[in-house]
Image: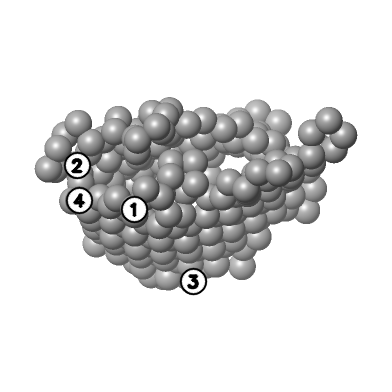
Amino acid sequence: MIDSQTEFQGNVSVTGSFASGNQNREDWDSALNLNWHQDRIQQGLEFNYESHHQQDLNAIKEHSLRYDIDWFFSDHRFWENTLEWGVNDYRAIDQFYRLGSAVGVQLWQQDNSALSTETGLLWIDEQFSDDSASRRVSWSWSSDYRRRLFAGLELHNNHKLIVSLEDTQDSELELNLSIRAPLSNGFFTELRYEWVYDNLPVANGRSVDSQLTVGVSYDWSQ
């Protein structure tokens, strides 16, 4: 439930690794999340950036920018609208846009845990590196779960299932799982696992992508 108090929250996380000698490699993975709560309106801005560069090879990049606005029309039910833009070299996507609208339920929200789920329609425009393109309206279903564990550990899990209304074989499943441990003064160390399954990948692409990262994050609120 959203009360009348204005609240601002933010989170930034960074992961980096470097190697030299037999292999020269540089990897970066960073994210920024901002959230505003006021009355029954909740807004969110999310930016993600990844870059993986190996000597004599072009850097592989993935970045996206997403804006959400939720209106809680009752204590536990909300209407969400999203706009997202990004690039994903891993899946040979030069550029993509997503515009979505969904209805969700905040099943519960407590200090120690929270669970929400939502479903709606998503318009997707993807432009691939082979000059082909895909534009479709899809059904989407997602959930978001967090739980505070022992010793200050925090578990966060979310998923999104996307199925094209024109061709149900054109589907995609995204899973994200992270565990955070507190350090001090708002800083956390974070272990994150990302998994994506694309039923119809671009030519010569793989259906499954996964990534495991360890980094540091910082939370603040006011």
- Name the secondary structure under disc 1: loop
Name the residue beneath numbered marker 1.
131
Disc 4 and disc 2: Cα gap in Å?
A: 7 Å
* Front: mark 4 or 1: 1
Disc 3 and disc 4: Cα gap in Å?
A: 37 Å
* Front: mark 3 or 4: 4
Cβ–Cβ under 8 Å for marks 4 and 2: yes
Q: Is residue 215 visible?
A: no
Cβ–Cβ under 8 Å for marks 2 and 1: no
Q: Which mark is residue 191?
A: none
Q: Earlier in the sequence, mark 3 or mark 4?
A: 3
Estimate how packed mark 1 is, as few (under 14), some (14 to 19) or many (20 or more) residues with alpha carbons within 10 Å.
few
Name the residue beneath numbered marker 4.
136
In this rendering, is residue 81 above or below 167? below
Name the residue beneath numbered marker 3.
6
Look at label 1 and name its amino acid. Answer: Asp
- Name the secondary structure under disc 4: strand
Indicate left or right for 187 with 21 as reference.
left
Q: Earlier in the sequence, mark 3 or mark 2?
A: 3
Residue at the spot 87% in from the left edge and 34% down from the top edge:
21
In this rendering, is residue 129 above or below 168? below
Name the residue beneath numbered marker 2.
164
